[in-house]
Every structure is written in C-alpha cells, then in structure tokens.
Image: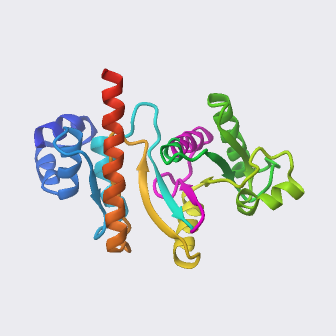
Amino acid sequence: YVDQFYKMRQRKGIMWREAERLMADPDYFAAMAVHLGDADGLVTGATQNYAECVRPILEIIGPGRRRTASGLNLVLFKDKMLFFADTAVNIDPTAEQVATIAMHAARVAEYFELEPRIAMLSYSNFRGKGDGPSKMKRAAEIVKQLHPHLIVDGEMQADTAVNPDVVDRIFPFCDIKNGANILIFPNLDSGNISYKLVQQLGGAEVIGPFLMGIKKPANVLQRTCTVDDIVNTIVLTALESQAMKEKESTLHA
C-alpha cells in the first residue's frame, strides 16, 4: 500500500517516508484497500474532522473521469424523500460543476425509483441577475442540454421549489409542477446550513452526506452522528457497492 501510494503521489510532494507514515492512518489505509479492490467500500468520520476524513478518499480513490465529487443528503419525511446537494465538498462550484452534481443526484433518485425533479436554488426566482442566480440558471440550461428528459428548472427560491401552490399561482411556466425532490444549492454554505437546520429543527430524518462522483463507495459521517446514522450509512454504502458491481458485470457481459 505504501509503494502504491508513493507512486500515486510522488509528483505531488509525497516522499516515501511520508507515504509510509500516512498509510499507518486508518483512513488512508482503508481508502487504499478500496482503491485496490481489497475492500468494497468504506465508512468513516464518526470521531474525526470531515475534511481530514475526505482528503484520503479524494487523493486515493478520487472522482471518476470528468466527474465532480460532491456530498448528497437524503432527507426523509413521512410522505416523501428529498435529496440535498452539494452539502459537503465544493465551496463555490462553477455552473458546470453544479450541473454535474445535479446529474449525479438524479441518478441516485432514479436508483430509488423516483422521477428526478431538480430545482436549482438561489435567492431569486427566474431573474438570472447576479453571479449566484446566473450560475444556477446556467447550470439548469446545461442539464437540459445534456439530458433533455430530466425535469430541471431554476434559478428559484427554496419555497418555490418545494411548494407547488407557489408555482401554480405565480410561476405557471416553471417546469417543476409537483414540487422538487432534488434541491441543488449554489455553494457549500447554503447546502450545509440547510440540511443541518432541517435535521435539528424540521422533524425530518437526515441521512448522509454521501459522496457522489467517487470511483468507488466511500462515505464520511458527521461527528454528531448517532448509531442509527452509522447503520444507515453502512447499509447504503453496501447497496452502492452492489449497484456498482451489477453495472460492471453488465458492461462485461
């Protein structure tokens, strides 16, 4: 594992002795085990800082080709499931990165047999003025161009996104008619703040964040997680691994 890590990072400032030291860290060791196929997935983060846990995942497993790593939270209410992204990785993603994050989230929703309805969130409704709104409007356009079958619109405010009555009364031209189930945030501040507020005050069960856009299953828990959170994350990581194996077997069939 030390030799493999050194080969991967020797042109990024890592000396062999540093590789040896880092590989003694459980997070680096686990990431290398997943990378080399000795483990199917990893779950970490319950007792450590998020950034320290996600770093070895990004350095060793890494995002897929032309992918953007991001964080996704499942928000469970009694009668529906919502997906929040990005809540964990990208501080200020570009329009192209936002679009990629949205498309990754759509695949997750489809895995749960839900029709993706993607809202690009901002502080304004369909005005496109200002850096943030313009970015989210552009991201929606990119998704529509690449995947015309997906339901996506924005930029829009959060209440417009989740309340069909607002759309019916004020924005009848909006493509999202029954409330969005995927909420894409313009930056890490808004995404992280939103899911934590919902978790603490909203009466919903929040699972995650899960890492999207990574080559192999690897997820980082919050330090405030409960035993149930850990179990849920392990189960979903296992399901993610099974889905990846099924996809690989289909490709090689």
Task: Tell me which residue sits at (36%, 46%) in the image.
Answer: 240
Quarter of the image for residue 159 reads bottom right
Looking at the picture, how far across and down is residue 43, in whole percent?
29, 57
Identify whether 12 is placed above or below 55.
above
Looking at the picture, how far across and down is residue 27, in whole percent?
23, 56
Residue 243 in the magenta stretch? The answer is no
Quadrant where the image shows the C terminus: top left
In the picture provided, is 25 more to the left or to the right than 112? Answer: left
The mark total stands at 0
Task: Tell me which residue sits at (76%, 50%) in the image.
Answer: 177
Looking at the picture, how far across and down is residue 117, in whole percent?
65, 47
Q: What stretch is highlighted in magenta?
A: 78-106
Spot the residue most to the bottom: 201
Residue 98 in the magenta stretch? The answer is yes
In the picture provided, is 172 more to the left or to the right than 21? Answer: right
Looking at the picture, how far across and down is residue 4, in whole percent?
15, 37
In the picture provided, is 229 more to the left or to the right than 10? Answer: right
Q: Nearer the viewer, residue 213 or 23?
A: 213
Task: Tell me which residue sits at (66%, 32%) in the image.
Answer: 149
Quadrant where the image shows the N terminus: top left
Spot the residue most to the top: 253
